[in-house]
Image (cartoon, grey):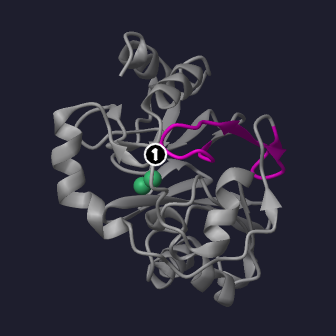
Amino acid sequence: MKTITPDIHELSLGIVNVWLIRDGDGWVLIDTGSPNSAGEILNAAGILGFPPEQLRHVVLTHHHADHAGSLAALRLRTPADATAHPLDADLIRRGTAVRPTLKPGPSAFSRVLVRLFGASGSAPYEPGIVEGEASDGDVLPIAGGLRVIHTPGHSAGHIALFAERQGVLFAGDTCANMFGLGPSIMYEDAAAGMGSLARLATLDFEAVCFGHGRAITRDAAGRFRRRWAGGI
Ligand SMILES: [Zn+2]
Ligand SMILES: [Zn+2]
């Protein structure tokens, strides 16, 4: 587990990261990992002193199985509600892992990585209840305010979440930091994805956390601006 700020913790579940955030006398989870991750998440939460009965909310960056795959299991074991963007919420309610339009990104490297990692994430997962819908500009009343930024491209209903008070951006799968800061390996719409990255690069944040790869904890906005200035 990596401490991003005293209240924000990143848990690596192998290929994908989730975030545990202290919120008043409870806690909040961003993303749920692949199916069968609930036990590992709740164990890690226990180490932080976050009991299952105090998980208040789950916020999902998008509908893919590696992010929403353990929502159903977590909801059975905690009282948390769940929130996602309306365009992806329905797919989570059906356990739909990928849209047919999801394709490898523009680089040849992407196609190699998709062959290595992509196939495992396409199977349907256990549908999860999502009662909350978060749209662009909403500020969720979590951790002093979590701003929702609609970032389509990787997924039509993908959202980034900006904890402005802490200066931490949760970029989800808008991009990744697996082999250096780079684009996501798959997009439904790569041009829209680039637009989303350009928009994120206008924000002022100190740290950025990715669904895949290592968080950047210093001068992250500067790294973003330099990396995305010339496009993907
Ligand atoms: Zn994804
Ligand atoms: Zn992912």
Q: Is residue 75 above or below residue 192?
A: below
- Could you tell me which quadrant the N terminus lies in? bottom left
Q: Residue furthest front?
A: 100
The image quarter in which residue 166 lies: top right
Q: Is residue 123 above or below residue 23?
A: below
Q: Is residue 98 above or below residue 147?
A: below
Name the foreground residue: 178 vs 19: 178
> Callout 1: few (<14), some (14-19), or many (20+) C-alpha neighbours within 10 Å?
many
Q: Residue at x 40, y 20 (%)?
A: 223
Name the foreground residue: 125 vs 73: 125
Q: Is residue 84 above or below residue 43?
A: above
What range of the chain is rendered magenta? 138-159
> Which residue corresponds to mark 1?
173
Q: Residue furthest top?
A: 230
| 3 left or right, relative to 108 | right
Name the foreground residue: 84 vs 190: 190
Q: Residue at x 41, y 18 (%)?
A: 228
